[in-house]
C-alpha cells in the first residue's frame, strides 16, 4: 500500500536542509525555486522512504532524486585515493545511452563541489576507459542494465554496498525487454536499501514491479498519470500516407521551425526520411539503434548547436534527449503504443516552456489515434493540411513517398523494395514490358532491316569453312574405383 503526498506551496531549495556545496551548485545552474516534482520528492527521499513517482520528462525529475542522493551520501564522502574508500553507494539505471549520459552530466554538475565521485557506463563504446574509471572507485554510478551486467561479469563493478537504487523511466525499461536484466541486478543488491522508481505512466507491469521490489513506497504524482504536459499544444493533421514527407517539409517552412524532432516507428523509415528531407533542402540527420554511439552523439551535438533542422529519431534513440526550449516535435508515424506518444511529446514544452506536438495521421492509423485519446482521456484536434507539393512528389507518389516511411518494419521493408524497383525502372525498363502510370510508351519507328533473319557475310562463311572440324578429345583409361565389399569386380563364388 502506498501513500500520497500533498503538494507543498512556495517551497525553496533552502528549506530542504541541503548542504552549502549543493546549494552553490544549484545556484550555478540557474535554479531558484524547485519544480513541483522536486518540491514533493526531495523531502521524501531525504527521509529514506521508497518512492514511486509519476512525472513526465522535462519536469526536473533528475534533480528530484539526484540532489537528495548527494545530500545523503555526503557523510561518507572522502578525498582518499584508495578505491576501497569509494564503493558504489548509489546506482541509477536508465533505459538508453542518451538518458544515462544526460543524467550523469546533471549529477556531475550538482556534486562538483563535493568529494563524491560519479561515473556513467553504457554500451556501444569501448569498455576499457569505463573499467579504468570504475577501478578508481565511484560512489554514484549511472548505467544501462546490459553494460552494467558486463562490468559485473568482468568484476569491475561491485554492487554489494549499494544503499540507494533509482529506476529512471522504468516503463521504458520494461518496454525494451530489460526485466530479466533488472531482476538479475536487483538480486545482486543488498536487501536493505532505498528504491526510487520513476515512470511517466503507471501500467500494470509497473505496479507489479513496484509491489515486488519497493517497500511501502510513497506515491508522488505531479500530474495525473498518463497525462500530457499542459504547456504542449497538440494538433493532429489528416494526411495521406504518400503525402507525409511533403507535410513535414511544409510544416517546417510554414512554421519557421529550425529545430524539431521527427519521430518514426522504424529504423529503416527514419533513415529514409532523413535522406528524403535532405533532398528537399532540409538539413536532417537520423538517430536509431543501428547507428553507433559515436554517430548518435555527433548527430545530437550538431542538433543542439542548431546545425541540424530535423532530427529524425525512433522512440528508443530519443529517450533521454534533453533539448532546451525545443519548439516542436512531429510524429511522422503515430506510435503503436499510446504510452510512447506521451514520451514523444514530452521532448517539447520542458521546464515551463511551451511547445507544439504535430502528428500526421493517415487513414490506416485511426486506431492508434483512438488508443492515444483513450490513454490521455481527451480528444485531439484534427485539422487538414493543404499541401503545395512539388511535381517530383506527385511523380513519386505511388512509389517512394507512399511506402518510403511506413510505420512499421514490415512497411519499411516494402518501401525499400519499391525504392529499388524505382531505381531499376529509372535506369532502364525491360523490353516489351508495359509501364503503368500516367506516362505512355513512346512508339519509335522500326527499320525493316532489323526484321530480316540473320545471314552470315561471305568472309565469315569462308573463314568458318576453312577451320578444320574439331576432333573429339581422346580420353584415357578410366581410373579404377574401389568397389565396396566386392574388390575390383572379382567374380563371385558360385553358390553351392
Image (tube, helix red, strand yellow):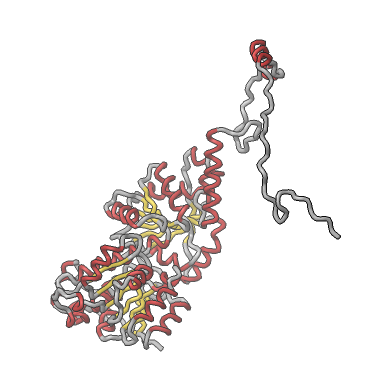
Q: Name the quadrant containing residue 399.
A: top right
In the rendered view, would you say 172 is above or below 6? above
Q: Nearer the viewer, residue 48 or 76?
A: 76
Can residue 293 be seen here? The reply is yes
In the rendered picture of this protein, how many numbered marks are placed on residues? Answer: 0
**x and y percentages locating residue 166 in the rendered image:** 32, 76
Indicate whether 209 appears above or below 468.
below
Report whether 142 appears left or right of 463: left
Q: Is residue 10 visible?
A: no
Counting from the top left corner in percent of width and height, residue 359 is at 45, 58
Identify which residue is drawn at 47% across, 64% down.
380
Q: Nearer the viewer, residue 232 or 130?
A: 130
Viewport quadrant of the C terminus: bottom right
Which of these two is toward me, 387 or 133? 133
Looking at the rendered image, the quarter that the N terminus falls into is bottom left
Give residue 240's position: percent from left, percent from top: 53, 51
Locate residue 187, reporting x and y percent: 38, 81
Amino acid at each position: 500500500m502506498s501513500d500520497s503526498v500533498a503538494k507543498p506551496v512556495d517551497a525553496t531549495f533552502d528549506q530542504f536542509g541541503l548542504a552549502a556545496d549543493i546549494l552553490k551548485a544549484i545556484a550555478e545552474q540557474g535554479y531558484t525555486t524547485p519544480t513541483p516534482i522536486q518540491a514533493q520528492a526531495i523531502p521524501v527521499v531525504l527521509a529514506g522512504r521508497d518512492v514511486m513517482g509519476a512525472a513526465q520528462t522535462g519536469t526536473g525529475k533528475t534533480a528530484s532524486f539526484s540532489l537528495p542522493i548527494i545530500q545523503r551520501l555526503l557523510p561518507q564522502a572522502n578525498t582518499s585515493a584508495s578505491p576501497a574508500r569509494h564503493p558504489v553507494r548509489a546506482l541509477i539505471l536508465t533505459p538508453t545511452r542518451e538518458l544515462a549520459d544526460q543524467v550523469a552530466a546533471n549529477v556531475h554538475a550538482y556534486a562538483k563541489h563535493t568529494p563524491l565521485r560519479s561515473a556513467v557506463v553504457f554500451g556501444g563504446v569501448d569498455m576499457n576507459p569505463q573499467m579504468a574509471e570504475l577501478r578508481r572507485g565511484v560512489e554514484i554510478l549511472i548505467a544501462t542494465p546490459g553494460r552494467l551486467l558486463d562490468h559485473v561479469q568482468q568484476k569491475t563493478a561491485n554492487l554489494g554496498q549499494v544503499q540507494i537504487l533509482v529506476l529512471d523511466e522504468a516503463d521504458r525499461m520494461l518496454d525494451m525487454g530489460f526485466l530479466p536484466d533488472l531482476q538479475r541486478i536487483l538480486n545482486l543488491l543488498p536487501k536493505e536499501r532505498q528504491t526510487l522508481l520513476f515512470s511517466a505512466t503507471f501500467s500494470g507491469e509497473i505496479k507489479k514491479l513496484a509491489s515486488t521490489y519497493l517497500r511501502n513506497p510513497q506515491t508522488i504524482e505531479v500530474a495525473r498519470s498518463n497525462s500530457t504536459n499542459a504547456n504542449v499544444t497538440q494538433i493532429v493533421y489528416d494526411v495521406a500516407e504518400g503525402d507525409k514527407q511533403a507535410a513535414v517539409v511544409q510544416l517546417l517552412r510554414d512554421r519557421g521551425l529550425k529545430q524539431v524532432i521527427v519521430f518514426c516507428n522504424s529504423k529503416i523509415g527514419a533513415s529514409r526520411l532523413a535522406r528524403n528531407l535532405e533532398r528537399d533542402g532540409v538539413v536532417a540527420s537520423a538517430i536509431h539503434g543501428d547507428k553507433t554511439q559515436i554517430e548518435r552523439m555527433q548527430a545530437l551535438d550538431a542538433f543542439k548547436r542548431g546545425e541540424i533542422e530535423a532530427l529524425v529519431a525512433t522512440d528508443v534513440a530519443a529517450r533521454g534527449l534533453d533539448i532546451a526550449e525545443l519548439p516542436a516535435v512531429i510524429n511522422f508515424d503515430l506510435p503503436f503504443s499510446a504510452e510512447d506518444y506521451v514520451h514523444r511529446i514530452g521532448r517539447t514544452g520542458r521546464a515551463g516552456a511551451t511547445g507544439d506536438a504535430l502528428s500526421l495521421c493517415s487513414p490506416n492509423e485511426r486506431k492508434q489515434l483512438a488508443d492515444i485519446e483513450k490513454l490521455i482521456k481527451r480528444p485531439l484536434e484534427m485539422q487538414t493540411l493543404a499541401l503545395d507539393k512539388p511535381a517530383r512528389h506527385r511523380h513519386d507518389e505511388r512509389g517512394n513517398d507512399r511506402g518510403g516511411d511506413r510505420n512499421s518494419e514490415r512497411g519499411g521493408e516494402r518501401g525499400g523494395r519499391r525504392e529499388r524497383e524505382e531505381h531499376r525502372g529509372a535506369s532502364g525498363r525491360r523490353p516489351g514490358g508495359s509501364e503503368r502510370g500516367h506516362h505512355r510508351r513512346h512508339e519509335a519507328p522500326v527499320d525493316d532491316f532489323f526484321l530480316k533473319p540473320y545471314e552470315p557475310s561471305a568472309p565469315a562463311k569462308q573463314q568458318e569453312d576453312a577451320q578444320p572440324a574439331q576432333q573429339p578429345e581422346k580420353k584415357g583409361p578410366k581410373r579404377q574405383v574401389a568397389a565396396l565389399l566386392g574388390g575390383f569386380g572379382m567374380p563371385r563364388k558360385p553358390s553351392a
